[in-house]
Image (cartoon, helix red, strand yellow):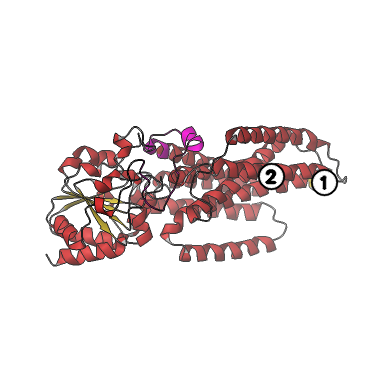
Amino acid sequence: MDTRLIMMQLAYLLSAVLFILGLKRLSHPDTARGGNQLAAIGMLVAIVATLVGGGIVTWQWIIGGLLIGGLVGGLMARLVKMTAMPQMVGLFNGFGGLASGLVAAAEYLRYTHGKVVESGVAVSEVPLDSSLSIMIGTLIGAVTFSGSLVAFGKLQGIVTEKAVKFPGQQVLNAGLFLGILALMGWLIISTPGAIAGADPSSINLWYWGLWIAAMILGILLVIPIGGADMPVVVSLLNSYSGLAASAAGFVLNNNVLIISGALVGASGLILTRIMCKAMNRSLANVIFGSFGEVAGKGPVAKGEKRTMADVNDVQADDVAMLLAYAKQVVIVPGYGLAVAQAQHKLRELCDNLESRGVNVKYVVHPVAGRMPGHMNVLLAEANVPYNQLYEPEDVNPDMANVDACLVVGANDVVNPAARDDPNSDLYGMPIIEVDRAKHCVVMKRSLNPGFAGLDNELFYLRNTMMLFGDAGDSIGRILEEVKQL
């Protein structure tokens, strides 16, 4: 074996080890930064090994891609707000799928145009294993790309956040999927018959038809899923992008790409399972029976419509008095915290309360926000100590002894209907039981429903106080009032 090839494979092995160690360290916030750095070093090693040992024909496209990609990535890192991070992650998933699909397409065209040379002879027949990998990579890549664009559009508000459904939708999806499988089988059988030098345009036309059909399938799979299920969709599409990368690794016979893609695919599936468990729903129920009918225009209670007269509207000084003299305070962050970028003010308020002897805990629901871990990232940005972050099951049993809960922009994850109302679409989803605390303060801009599009009975309970307005401004006013007490 060529020495250069041996060194490249050893570098790939080192990269794979670094990926695994980095992924392991990502499981805890104290080691997550170091884990991310290990994985980045592993990727750098893999890229350098490929460029040095892969027999690069021309460097112009590579250098151009590095410059353009680095510029776009740098601008995104600087300009994209934390509130837009979920849709940005969805977009990245789509780009990953597209890249993997284009790798499959490039290899397919190389074979059908006789550009693969072995022992000085042009090879036009696609080996069965390569053909299978190309077709699978094309299918997963195209579905991931178009599905991720729809998820991005829903999160960005470009596409309706409602679950888009129509009669016969599942039959259409099933028929389209079976048609795609049949087309893939036909292409696998037909492609080896392409003769080098002959016009392969007719076969290539069917291949591009496979791309179009797979992209349509990706759109049809995501549009019936509502906004409330987007955390699950984002994690699932992340898994798809990993599987697409792994398929591209098989196409290129690249071990490190196979391993890294498999790691992303497996971790994405594990995360998807965690999200589904947090919602007490199966993945099939999320995909085929979503409850994300987003209204966004006002309360949508199934019974009598509630108004502002039905809530206990309070001011910042009332909340400050309650928090300052409490013994135990529970903070429940939600998407409204991200919108207001109020995490730093919230940390300052909690620090002030702790200096007064108040025991403060942050309770983060797994599906809070619009992507997995959204609230954890937000609180980490404000340097909230990890030992103050709790899972709902750690706090719920003792919630009756909590003096005050401060709900900052959360909605569906604190809706008592998920626990008490069998007729609610949220029923069965584990929640943070803030309604059982002695007092609950909910900070929201209005009585509008959350991403699930359902009215929240919590707002109208006797022990609930509503503080309306921008979370950043409200927390700032509360902080000033607490300082004066």
Residue type, mark 2 in image:
Trp
The disc, 1 or 2, on the residue closer to the chain's N-terminal end is: 1
Q: In the rendered image, which quarter is residue 167 located in?
A: top right
Q: Residue at position x 57%, y 39% from top?
A: 166
For this view, does 227 lie left or right of residue 240?
A: left
Identify the residue position indicated by label 2 in the image. 211
Q: Residue 279 in magenta?
A: yes
Whether residue 10 appears in magenta in the rendering, the answer is: no
Q: Position of residue 88 (x, y in %)?
A: 50, 55
Query: Is residue 7 visible in this depiction of the protein?
Result: no
Outermost residue, front side: 304
Range covered by the magenta-colored residues: 275-302
Mark 1: amino acid:
Ser
Q: Residue at x 43, y 36 (%)?
A: 273
Tell me which secondary structure the magenta stretch mostly adopts.
Answer: loop
Crowd band around label 2 with a 10 angstrom C-alpha radius: few (<14), some (14–19), many (20+) = many
Residue annotated with mark 1: 201
